[in-house]
Image (tube, rainbow, N blue to C red):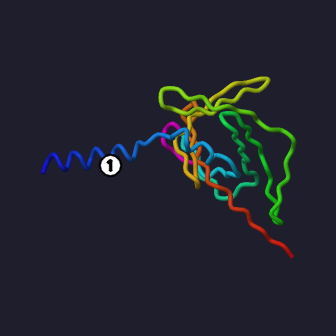
Amino acid sequence: MMKKLLIICFIFLASCSSKVDKKQLHQLNGYWEIKEVTFKDGAKKEYSINSTVDYIQLDSLKGFRKKMSPKFNGTFETSNDAEPFYIRISNDSIFMSYTNNSNAWEEVLTKLTEESFSVKNKEGLTYQYIRFEPINITP
């Protein structure tokens, strides 16, 4: 009986700590809005309404991230600025690595599904995103 209980606990713990698989990376493509930020001390900041969303496009292990402003007719306003990134895989972790003229940083991808993803930066902040659902109001 004790062995069965230990096996069940092990399976449960293993399923809770599953890592992001490289085969899932295509799920990053699309429009995302920030849902919540969890700080190093465990405090959380929730975002109920966002004026911008992130558009991510990934092809192979290179991509870009761009800020978009959704409009009520289902379209978006944006600038031509895009933040390029590449995927770096190290020690079974997947990193989104960014470099621009003045800075370089990485975020580890901690969760990825069709509906959400989370990244954690070196300062210990975790950003949770959910798939953006546009509101289309046409006259």
In the displayed structure image, the side of residue 40 where residue 62 appears, left or right: right
Residue type of the residue flagged with mark 1? Phe
86 and 39: which is toward the camera? 86
Q: Which residue is mark 1?
A: 12
Q: Nearer the viewer, residue 37 or 25?
A: 25
Q: Which residues are magenta?
A: 40-45
Residue 41 position in % (x across, y down): 49, 38
Residue 43 belongs to the span the image colors magenta: yes
| Residue 115 to residue 73: above or below | above
Residue at screen point 80% across, 71% down: 137
Q: Residues within 10 Å of mark 1 (few under 14, many from 20)?
A: few
- In the rendered structure, the answer to whether residue 50 lies left or right of residue 117 reads right
- Where residue 54 appears, as percent x and y from the top left, is 72, 47
Tell me what residue is drawn at x 56 percent, y 29 percent: 89
| Image side of residue 15 versus residue 23, left or right | left
Position of the C terminus, as image quadrant, is bottom right
In the image, what residue occupies the spot 73% across and 47% down? 55
Magenta span: helix, strand or loop, mainly? loop
- Residue 46 vs 87, above or below: the answer is below
Which percent across, then down, holds residue 114?
Answer: 58, 53
Between 33 and 49, the one lying in front of the other is 33
Task: Please determine whether, in this image, residue 137 is positioned above or below residue 119.
Answer: below
Q: Residue furthest bottom?
A: 139
Of the pair 51 and 96, the residue shown nearer to us: 96
Which SS class for mark 1?
helix
The image quadrant of residue 6 is top left
Residue occupying the point 69% across, 25% down? 104
Residue 55 colored in magenta in the image: no
